[in-house]
Image: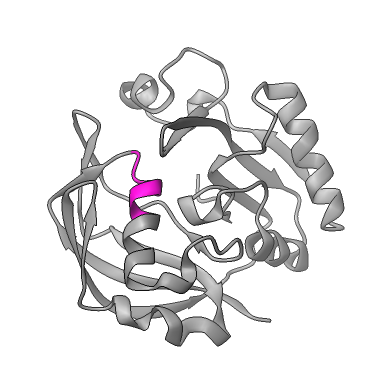
Amino acid sequence: MTVVDVQFRLQGNTIPVDHGYHLSSAVSEVVPSLHGDQEVGLHPIAGQLVGNRLMAITERSFLTIRISSERISEILPLAGKTLSIDKHALTVGVPRTCALAPSDQLYSRLVVIKGFMEPEPFLDAVQRQLEGLEVKANPSLVDQSHIAEANRDKETGSHSPYLRRTIRIRDKEVVGFAVRVEELTPEASICIQQKGIGGRRRFGCGLFVPDRS
């Protein structure tokens, strides 16, 4: 099975910073087969923070879906549609397919593992999941120096040394951490990007990309 990222350019004004649940719901309305699918991942949309828990859509904003290449045709109906992200409209453009790129260092903005909300037990749980994938690597929790000083409290809502983040799913606030995995072979890097760590992939959690920091 070959897993790829399919990117759709977006047009719109603003969306909530915490948009994972609303994005998943909007995409599932157009492609009902994705509802509840544990294998498909929806990357968080990039944008520019503008205050009031909103971010602006920019030229770097894409709807990016991580999916097996055999299922690409399943998500093509999204092109040309207008999605409602918590009452914010996004128009979806033409897609392009991007192969997963191996990297010796990967990063995930938010990993959530049920039952683990404190740094040390959480990191142990990450290590166990890597072992379950038969991957040898060096995982770590990202500290707040990873983001700009001006945005730290906006991102974390706390003064924890680690980049603890939350995502609201329906009426629940789910807690997780930003995670970096280093010392990867090309094969291990692709494996982690394909499989992810933790749950809630369809809400943008546990998806890894090459770390450019």
Left or right: where does residue 60 sit relative to residue 37? left
Per the image, is 136 magenta? Answer: no
The mark total stands at 0
Residue under the point 31% across and 22% down: 150
Q: Position of residue 138 (x, y in %)?
A: 77, 42
* Quarter that holds the N terminus: bottom right
Q: Nearer the viewer, residue 211 or 36?
A: 36
Whether residue 77 is situated above or below residue 178 in the rendered picture: below
Note whether residue 17 is visible. Answer: yes
Q: How is the image coloured?
A: one colour
Please provide percent x and percent y for residue 78: 30, 75
Image quadrant in which you'd find residue 40: bottom right
Question: Relative to 187, is 160 on the left or the right?
Answer: left
Query: In the rendering, at what x and y percent does residue 134 appear?
Result: 87, 58
Relative depth, front residue between 213 and 38: 38
The part of the image, by quadrant, that contains residue 73 is bottom left
Determine the residue positioned at 69% across, 59% down: 192
- In the rendered image, the residue lying farthest to the top is 159
Magenta stretch holds residue 19 = yes
Left or right, 200 with respect to 26, comes to: right
Q: Residue furthest left?
A: 13
Q: Residue at x 47, y 63 (%)?
A: 35
**What main secondary structure does the magenta stretch of the protein show?**
helix
Q: Nearer the viewer, residue 77 or 96?
A: 77
Q: Which residues are magenta?
A: 18-23
Q: Is residue 210 visible?
A: no
Q: Position of residue 82 (x, y in %)?
A: 18, 67
